[in-house]
Image: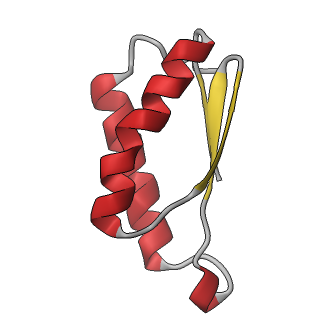
Amino acid sequence: MREIRTTNYPSAVEILGAQVELAQRLDHHPVVTVDYAGARFELWTHVSGGLSQLDLDYAQALDELVSTHFSDVVVTT
């Protein structure tokens, strides 16, 4: 699971939208929950019944996407 806290709801929705191309490219689609100040990405591979290399690849690519394009709206704790 990746939880990304943002400064506001619109920023969380922008991150959700930005990851669509990533999910399509990897053919791996997380369960995403968006709230007032963040997004939670739940990753697992159904066919393997747990985490796989694909989940790790997606998480790394998501981290890179967020740090490159959304560092000004991400809240670190």
Is 14 situated above or below 54? Answer: above
Left of 41 or right of it: where is 16?
Answer: left
Q: How is the image coloured?
A: secondary structure
Q: Residue at x 52, y 26 (%)?
A: 13
Up/down of 13 relative to 37, above or below: below
x, y (%) of residue 19?
Answer: 39, 43
Q: Residue furthest bottom?
A: 48
x and y percentages locating residue 42 in the rendered image: 65, 56
Residue under the image location 56 percent in, 58 percent down = 30
Q: In the picture, which quadrant includes the C terminus?
A: top right
- Residue that appears at 43% across and 73% down: 54
Q: Is residue 38 above or below residue 29?
A: above
Find residue 16 and report its horizontal and vertical position in percent. Answer: 49, 36
Quarter residue 65 falls in: top left
- Quarter of the image where one finds residue 68: top left
The number of numbered badges drawn on the structure is 0
Nearest the camera: 1 or 76? Answer: 1
Which residue is at 30% across, 25% downward? 69
